[in-house]
Image (spheres, grey):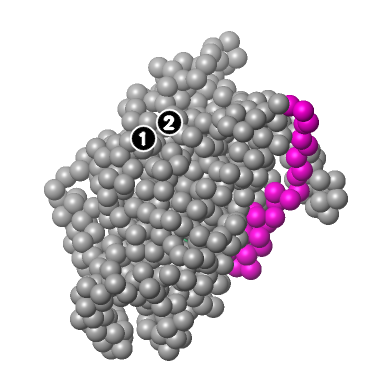
């Protein structure tokens, strides 16, 4: 039996109290034992919002005041140049951007889009997008893990063109494809059309979209780009419950259907690549940043001609995003725990499904369900947080085994081909979230770039299904044990990490 969200934490608490302390004869769990309104009722008051506005303004002022003389001079000069650059944009941009648009058109793979993104972007923003934690071992493993399994096809199965149906229910909403575009903060840093370009392309392919709490486009603009489209809001583990509640209330009004709590971003990972590429917020306009800006004219012109972006889902954040980095950093709450998560689930109430994103252990997955989450999202934050964190694909079977077949499991991490999506589905995921794969497209060419990425992934998925002889995702999952095999050579290389490639089989920890 699946209990309603509100009852699940109470039942779990009652069960654990009963098993810990009650005599065996009366150990039957009783839902009525726990206080019914144990979850804090947060009110948005004028006082609380005024205090936050003040705090935000103070942090922004300190950030602007902390700029060096040179930074202040260049920012001021850019403010003067901006209207002129914006006026010339319709004429100049198509010319400056033509090589990048051509690269997008010519791209045959996500890797081609990555190269196109690297060419178009400023080196420091490319470093932010493409980089991972420390030496990027986790990042590389998240990509290479798919090579450890192989697919065994059937022959003479009679599956014709147009007969593969990849429709999937993602957090309660039907989508045409089993993968979706996942949240990423500050997409206007990559391309000035940002999240709106992502939403437009996602709507075109009818794939689901998760939008970051640190979106640089407004909820309304994203909804305008994809009006009838399922949207999931991704939240960080922030301190200020009033602020979170305001964000949730607005998201409900705008029609978000799902909520995802990113739980693996409680501390900020060590991004060595960002240090190496000289990434600073705000830009320090050093020689290095200036030279790199000249090497990426399309990105730089885009940056110079558009209004500086802000964090549009953060209430009262009427400041450029670059002034708010300290405020945002202070909002991160490393102590955010299961009680906070329970509060968040109860705030979302019956609006739609809630996912816990960042799960890497079966135990955590079980506890998430007891806490009130509907969906388990297996992720290591794109290898950007804990270095050497296990690849999401590797722990999928453990998580699936822990929650059983009826709980929705999403996975992200290292997806660069539709084949990776198919492998993840066969290994136990219900759907797969893609990040860099489409963000490279966005950075390389705005909406046409995202469209190209989704086209590549979609074609890949249909082709793989056709060659495997599977018509639907359900059929793929059913036949997974005979389709998905462990590549024995890589299993040996992994020193025993793989005990089996079949969906539902539990991975054993590395034996050494
Ligand atoms: C934000 O979520 C990041 O990974 O930088």
Q: Identify the secondary structure beneath mark 1.
A: loop
Tell me how far mark 2 sits from mark 1, CA to CA. 8 Å
* Residue 131 lies in the magenta stretch: yes
* Residue 225 lies in the magenta stretch: no
In the depicted view, which residue is nearer to us: 172 or 51?
172
Classify 10 Å Cα crowding around label 2: few (below 14), some (14-19), many (20 and above).
some
Rendering quarter of residue 344: top left
- Answer yes or no: is residue 214 visible: no
> Where residue 432 sits: x, y (%)?
55, 42
Of badges 2 and 1, nearer the viewer stands 2
Classify 10 Å Cα crowding around label 1: few (below 14), some (14-19), many (20 and above).
many
**Residue 338 horizontal side relative to residue 306, left or right:** right
Q: Identify the secondary structure beneath mark 2.
A: strand
Q: Earlier in the sequence, mark 2 or mark 1?
A: 2
119 in relation to 247, above or below: below
Kindly identify which numbered label has been placed on residue 160.
none
Rendering quarter of residue 298: bottom left
Kindly identify which numbered label has been placed on residue 173.
2
12 in relation to 409, above or below: above
- Answer yes or no: is residue 71 visible: yes
State the extent of the magenta-drawn residues as a range: 130-157
> Where residue 220 sits: x, y (%)?
25, 47
Residue at figure coordinates x 32%, y 58% from the top left:
216
Residue at figure coordinates x 71%, y 37% from the top left:
467
**Labels 2 and 1 touching (C-beta < 8 A):** yes
In the depicted view, which residue is nearer to us: 101 or 368?
101
Q: Which residue is mark 1?
A: 257
């Amino acid at each position: 039996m699946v209990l309603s969200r509100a009852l699940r934490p109470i039942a779990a608490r009652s069960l654990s109290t009963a098993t810990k302390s009650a005599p065996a004869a009366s150990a039957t769990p009783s839902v009525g034992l726990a206080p019914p309104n144990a979850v804090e009722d947060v009110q948005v008051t004028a006082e609380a919002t005024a205090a936050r506005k003040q705090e935000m303004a103070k942090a922004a002022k300190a950030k602007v005041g902390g700029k060096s003389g040179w930074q202040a001079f260049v920012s001021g000069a850019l403010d003067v140049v901006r209207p002129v650059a914006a006026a010339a944009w319709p004429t100049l941009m198509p010319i400056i951007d033509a090589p990048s648009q051509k690269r997008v058109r010519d791209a045959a793979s996500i890797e081609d889009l990555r190269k196109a993104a690297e060419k178009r972007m400023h080196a420091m923003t490319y470093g932010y997008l493409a980089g991972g934690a420390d030496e990027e071992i986790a990042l590389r493993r998240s990509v290479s893990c798919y090579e450890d399994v192989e697919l065994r096809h059937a022959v003479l199965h009679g599956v014709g063109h147009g007969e593969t149906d990849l429709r999937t229910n993602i957090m309660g909403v039907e989508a045409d494809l089993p993968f979706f575009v996942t949240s990423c903060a500050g997409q206007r840093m990559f391309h000035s059309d940002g999240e709106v370009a992502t939403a437009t392309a996602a709507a075109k392919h009818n794939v689901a979209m998760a939008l970051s709490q640190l979106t640089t486009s407004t909820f309304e603009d994203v909804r305008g780009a994809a009006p009838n489209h399922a949207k999931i809001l991704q939240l960080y583990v922030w301190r200020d419950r009033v602020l979170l509640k305001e964000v949730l209330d607005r998201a409900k009004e705008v029609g978000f259907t799902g909520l995802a709590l990113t739980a693996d971003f409680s501390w900020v990972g060590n991004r060595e690549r960002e240090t190496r590429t000289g990434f600073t917020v705000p830009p320090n306009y050093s020689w290095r940043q200036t030279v790199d800006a000249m090497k990426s004219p399309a990105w730089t012109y885009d940056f110079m001609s558009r209004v500086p972006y802000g964090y549009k889902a953060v209430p009262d954040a009427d400041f450029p995003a670059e002034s708010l980095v300290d405020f945002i950093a202070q909002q991160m709450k490393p102590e955010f725990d299961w009680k906070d998560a329970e509060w968040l689930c109860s705030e979302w109430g019956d609006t739609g499904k809630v996912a816990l994103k960042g799960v890497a252990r079966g135990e955590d997955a079980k506890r998430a369900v007891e806490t009130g989450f509907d969906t388990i999202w297996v992720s290591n934050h794109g290898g950007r947080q804990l270095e050497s964190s296990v690849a999401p694909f590797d722990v999928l079977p453990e998580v699936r085994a822990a929650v059983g077949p009826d709980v929705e499991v999403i996975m992200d991490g290292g997806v660069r081909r539709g084949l990776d999506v198919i492998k993840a589905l066969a290994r136990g995921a219900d759907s797969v979230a893609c990040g860099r794969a489409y963000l490279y497209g966005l950075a390389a060419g705005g909406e046409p770039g995202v469209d190209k990425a989704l086209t590549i992934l979609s074609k890949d998925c249909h082709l793989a299904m056709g060659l495997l002889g599977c018509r639907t995702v359900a059929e793929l999952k059913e036949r997974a044990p005979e389709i998905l095999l462990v590549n024995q050579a890589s299993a040996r290389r992994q020193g025993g990490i793989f005990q089996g490639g079949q969906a539902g089989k539990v991975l054993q920890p590395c034996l050494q």
